[in-house]
Amino acid sequence: MDNLSGWHKGLSRAWDQLTEGWQELRERASHALTRFYPRRTGNEVETVSDQLTHYGPGWGMLAAEVNDDGSTIEVRLEVPGMEPDGFDLHVNDDLLIIRGEKHAEREGEQGRFYLMERAYGRFERVVPLPAAVDDSRAKATYRRGVLTVRLPKVSGSVARRIEVNRG
């Protein structure tokens, strides 16, 4: 009976760890999970590119990093397969809104897909900013599939230590 009890405890502990890991992954990835909307031109799907967009997954991961160095907020977003002019960026209050459209490109008409995990179509990703920024001085670059947006903080929002004196 002791062996069975020990096995049960071990299995229960393993299940708890697996459940905890999935919950952490879900929480961390929930903001990065992004809906992609295929472009609809009519009822028929005509080109191979249209087929990839229409039949591909409607969700994809656009993982972000937000860094505050004291004077600038830097947002880095993984968006492979885009061109620099394919993005539309806006700041609305404390949110960076990134819109774009990821087009499917395929050379040749031959072959058949057996695995299709990449998402195509229009998307919108909203990234919360930790401080007020001056969007008129923002700079954005796109290199190697990563969009980097540097947003200077507005005057007065730089973190400073306030010393407390004896009263």
Image (cartoon, helix red, strand yellow):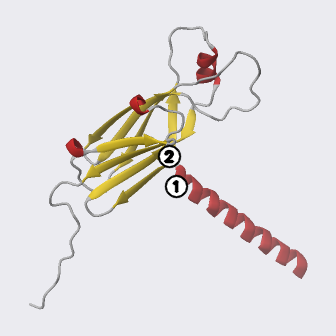
Q: Amino acid at mark 2?
A: Ala
**Percent x, y of residue 110:** 75, 17
Residue at (88% x, 75% y) in the render? 4
Numbered circle sitting on residue 28 = 1
* Residue drawn at (83%, 78%) of the image: 6
Q: Which residue is label 2 attached to?
A: 32
Q: Nearer the viewer, residue 167 or 64?
A: 64
User: Height in image: 104 above or below 124?
Assistant: above
Question: Can residue 1 be seen?
Answer: no
Does 7 sit left or right of 71 as displayed? right
| Quarter location, residue 17 | bottom right
Residue 14, image quadrant: bottom right
- Is disc 2 in contact with disc 1, using a CB cutoff of under 8 Å? yes
User: Quadrant location of residue 114?
Assistant: top right
Q: Is residue 75 left or right of residue 164?
A: right
Asked whether 6 or 101 is in front, the reply is: 101
- The picture places residue 7, in percent across and down from the top left corner, at 84, 73
List x then y, in percent, for residue 92: 26, 41
